[in-house]
Amino acid sequence: MNNRILEFDVIICGAGPAGSTAAFLLAKKGLRVALIDKEVFPRDKLCGGLLTKKSYNLIDSIFGINFLRQETEFFSNRFEVYYGRTKIISSFSKKLFLYVDRKKFDFAILKKAIESGAYFFEKTKVVDIDVNNLLVFTNNNTFKGRYIVAADGVNSIIRSSLVKNEIIDIREYKDNLTLAMEFYDYKFTTDRASLYFGFTKFGYGWIFPNKERTIVGMGALISKNNGLIKKQFNNFLNSIGYKEPTKVFSHLIPTGWIPNRVGFNNILLVGDAGGFVDPITGEGIYYAVRTGQVATDAILISEKNKLFAEINYERFLDKMLKDLRNRKRYRNIVFGTKFRLFIKIFLLVQLIVFRDKILDFIHEPS
Ligand SMILES: Cc1cc2nc3c(=O)[nH]c(=O)nc-3n(C[C@H](O)[C@H](O)[C@H](O)COP(=O)(O)OP(=O)(O)OC[C@H]3O[C@@H](n4cnc5c(N)ncnc54)[C@H](O)[C@@H]3O)c2cc1C
């Protein structure tokens, strides 16, 4: 442990899409930025890698059109939806779905951040923060900033610190955690996204295409499934023809915890750390990049209006927070009923009658 205090304008904890986007944009504006991550990059990140239109439009607008031209592993507008083994619909979306490999994609954004002048500290694990003095304690150095951006993912140490200090309320956090599991099939290839309902409650299974592998996964709310999600995942895998997949990975997604505060004074929560994920689909890359961008705007405005960045950030996020609350309400309609036949008919009618509206709901920002 080194006791040196390193001073920066902004300390960004976590170099996923949320943290690296904020680091890229803030460093580009001339602020001294420290970007800290516990891992060595390129690192693996469990994810389906699916980008909707709102995600790729946003990423294009921040990193330029060539960025995703290089980072896209696969693209397709084909999708199908199953209930159990029954195929309900096989169709096309007017807008493409892009698929990235998170190991390469996250590394590419990180490189953009470093190129724009951010100082990157890898193998540097945040262990605690001092919320009043804006100090970040790590396994290596102590960092001091005028702002702190918490981009350290679903198990955020910074969010825990704000909870410990009774600033953030996480009563609803546990009830809205999704356990997501995936494994990679390097032999089977597909050209479409397949979604599977009926194997779990408040969740779904997926098969997503990619360049070198097909990604097979399932995610569901822990609080609704009485410890059965692993078994349900195996049932799903068996039903689509997998007997014993060798390596299954799992990770949490915060789906539907909407924070009572989006930070504290000059500390801002972004991406998974702040619960910014679609409560129905579990899509998080868009929200990570967008909150990284909005946190940047909030900090830059704070430099001028001298208000706490949290005040500006909350104001800028108002529309997104309302939209996430609405999506959480729809979740109960989509997944809430106990009648399986009803869900089947409901899905079928919705998909046939409102197909384009549903696709817009998935693809377009609020
Ligand atoms: C199985 C699965 C499938 C998914 N599929 C999709 C999908 O297809 N499309 C989509 O849009 N979203 C998907 N998501 C959600 C998406 O992956 C996340 O919402 C997104 O990665 C959030 O980005 P982030 O930058 O907030 O956090 P992360 O990407 O989790 O990055 C956090 C970073 O913080 C670092 N870190 C954590 N703790 C510390 C610490 N103490 N000190 C220092 N560094 C730390 C980590 O190493 C990591 O690099 C999926 C999630 C899962 C689990």
Image (spheres, rainbow, N blue to C red):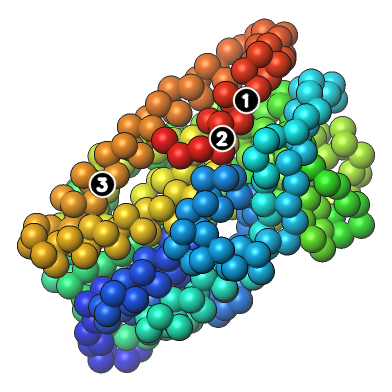
Residue 356: image tag: 1
Label 2, label 1: how many angstroms apart (C-alpha)? 10 Å
Residue 316: image tag: 3
Closest to the observer: 11 or 315? 315
Q: Is mark 1 within 8 Å of ligand 1?
A: no
Residue at image location 35% in from the left, 39% down from the top: 320
Picture quadrant of residue 3: bottom left
Residue annotated with mark 2:
362
**Residue 310 in picture, x, y percent from top left:** 19, 53
Q: Is residue 49 visible?
A: yes
The answer to whether mark 2 and mark 3 are in CB contact below 8 A is: no
**Residue 267 in picture, x, y percent from top left:** 23, 61
Q: Give the mark, 2 or 1, whose residue is nearer the N terminus.
A: 1
Residue at image location 62% in from the left, 18% down from the top: 354
Q: Is mark 2 within 8 Å of ligand 1?
A: no
Compared across the picture, whether 201 is left or right of 146 comes to right
**What kind of element bears circle 1?**
helix
Label 1 crowding class (10 Å Cα cut-off): few <14, some 14-19, many 20+?
Answer: some
Number of marks in the rendered image = 3
Q: Give the mark, 3 or 1, whose residue is nearer the N terminus.
A: 3
Give amino acid for label 2: Ile
Give amino acid for label 1: Asp
- State the quadrant of the C terminus: top left
Label 3, label 1: how many angstroms apart (C-alpha)? 29 Å
Residue 120: image tag: none
**What kind of element bears circle 2?**
helix
Location of residue 249 with respect to 9 vertically, above or below: above
Q: Give the mark, 2 or 3, whose residue is nearer the N terminus.
A: 3
Picture quadrant of residue 107: bottom right
Closest to the observer: 323 or 77? 77
Label 3 crowding class (10 Å Cα cut-off): few <14, some 14-19, many 20+?
Answer: some
Residue at image location 48% in from the left, 76% down from the top: 112
